[in-house]
Image (tube, helix red, strand yellow):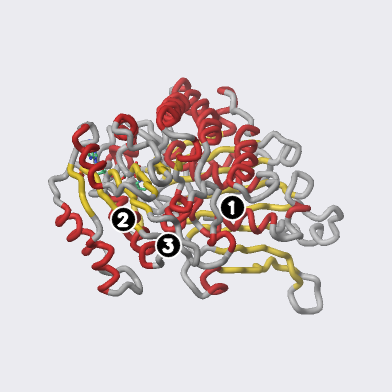
Amino acid sequence: MDHNPFREGLSHTRRADPVTVVIFGVTGDLTRRKLLPALFALYRKGVSRLGVIGFARRDWQTEGLRQRAGEILRDAPDATDEQRAAFVNQLSYVRSTFDETAGYRELARQLPKDGDRLFYLSTPPESYEAIIRNLGEAGLNRPGGGSIRVVVEKPFGRDLESARRLNRLLADYFDEQQIYRIDHYLGKETVQNIMLLRFGNGIFEPLWNHRYVEHIQITVSERLGVEGRGNYYDSAGALRDMVQNHMFQLLSLTAMEPPIDLQADSIRDEKVKVVRAIGPIAPSELDTHTCRGQYSSGYSDGTAVPGYMQEDGVPPDSRTETFVAIKLFVNNWRWSGVPFYLRTGKRLRRKVSEIAVTFRTPPLELYSNRHPTMTRNTLIIRIQPEEGITLTVNTKIPGYTTDMRPVNVDFAYGSAFGESTLEAYERLLFDALVGDSTLYTRRDEIEASWRFITQLLEGWQNSQSRPQLYEPGSSGPHGARALPGGAGHRWRKL
Ligand SMILES: NC(=O)c1ccc[n+]([C@@H]2O[C@H](COP(=O)([O-])OP(=O)(O)OC[C@H]3O[C@@H](n4cnc5c(N)ncnc54)[C@H](OP(=O)(O)O)[C@@H]3O)[C@@H](O)[C@H]2O)c1
């Protein structure tokens, strides 16, 4: 693994080798919103001598791509016209479908003979196979002067079998060290901070186990609905779209053992052990350990909004879940018996991503007998909207009595460091450029997570049950309350 200046905190002084990034799907939404802005930021910071070739089917020429890129980057913060022009003028375009071998010959012609190559698959997942095979058949997977890496977007498979198939196909043409399976959650500062918080401080780790932790909640809630992506979403659902990838990443970083060092594989070795240790949920436990929901029509911010089944591209009898809550256990020495509650959904009350670690009450109930509302200490790692950390502690209210109230000890990234956090895609692209795969998902990890998720999907399919309806702007379906309720726990308020 290369030395990574971000991790070492040495600023951007180290450069990646000269590299050409090939974006498959350069005319698409992700390129516009995330990839071009991130590549431009890296270019401006001089991280590498960077060239970009776009590949897509639309009838554009290089000039058309440059013009579009100029528009996209017009409002890039702190950029000068000169920088923008320099970046835009090195872009070039290959117009081809992903099936045509002529397109890959043209790509080979445009690629510089020397330097590294990064192939970025920002395309519908159905296209991955054609691109990987054609890159291989054209010999573009074989290193010439520099290294070759391939970034694969999510979704990576839709069940265990399809994920395995894709992994096998990639392995036919690339070594595992060349393959970067992206999960943009891992590019977020607070997500990376989970490890630093746990293993860079002396006070948390002694308590981070079943003796002191009562339960852990992971929430990723959204206010928006499917926003015109009904067609895609209906074939996915909340479990595939959020839990298999983002939420399992949060879970494994929260629950993992300390790695022996900070090498990519040392960290990923520990993460995959967590996913493997998750106890399967038997068909008979589906009702007590999972709850699915689907948003109904109603009002969001006072505006009438359609229910999920009335959204464009969604069949009127769809059984796809827009909300899911799961109670699971990580069956290892550290976490035996500690419930992990996961919930995610669309059209909920608030947009929140957080991990909440709730600690047990003190062993002797000196105060809690007199103060039944005394709260349990909870450490909240906030990922969205404001990245930061909060610890709730019970404190005495000033006065003659020992009345108490929980207060928050707060740390916010924005105010603590006074600079905006890096965009996730910028960080992740930087890592791929320098060959650091720590924040990318390894083959065994992705297959372990699909193993668990596929069992759930099959269980639901066999049960013939439907998701429960919930109101827009609510906390999800009523049935979700029972999940922690059975153990006397409660969801945190959204
Ligand atoms: N958009 C996001 O916010 C987001 C977030 C996370 C992950 N992702 C993932 O990123 C990937 C791309 O998403 P997107 O939203 O950018 O998709 P998109 O807007 O539909 O773009 C798809 C791109 O692929 C090209 N394409 C599709 N089929 C092709 C073919 N047969 N031959 C040549 N070009 C073809 C399209 O070219 P033409 O339009 O020129 O035909 C377009 O450039 C997906 O895997 C998605 O799941 C997206």
Please state if 361 lies on the left or on the right of 69 as rendered: right
Q: Which of the pair 378/113 is nearer the observer?
A: 113
Mark 3 sits near ligand 1, with its Cβ under 8 Å away: no
Mark number, residue 355 = 1
Q: Residue furthest bottom?
A: 399
Q: Residue at x 49, y 27 (%)?
A: 454
Classify 10 Å Cα crowding around label 2: few (below 14), some (14-19), many (20 and above). many
Q: Find residue 470 and report its image quarter.
A: top left
Q: Residue at x 68, y 52 (%)?
A: 358
Q: Which residue is mark 3?
A: 47
> Marks 1/3: CA distance?
33 Å
> Marks 2/1: CA distance?
39 Å
Q: Which of the pair 20/428 is nearer the observer?
A: 20
Q: Find residue 124 and report its image quarter.
A: top left
Mark 3 or mark 1, which is nearer the start of the sequence? Answer: 3
Q: Compared to 356, does 164 lie above or below?
A: above
Give the amino acid type for the residue marked by disc 1 in the picture.
Ile
Give the amino acid type for the residue marked by disc 3 in the picture.
Val
Q: From where the camera sits, is residue 228 visible?
A: yes
Q: Pointers 2 and 1 in contact (CB under 8 A)? A: no
Mark 1 or mark 2, which is nearer the start of the sequence? Answer: 2
The x and y percentages for residue 297 are 33, 45
Q: Which residue is mark 2?
A: 51
Mark 2 sits near ligand 1, with its Cβ under 8 Å away: no
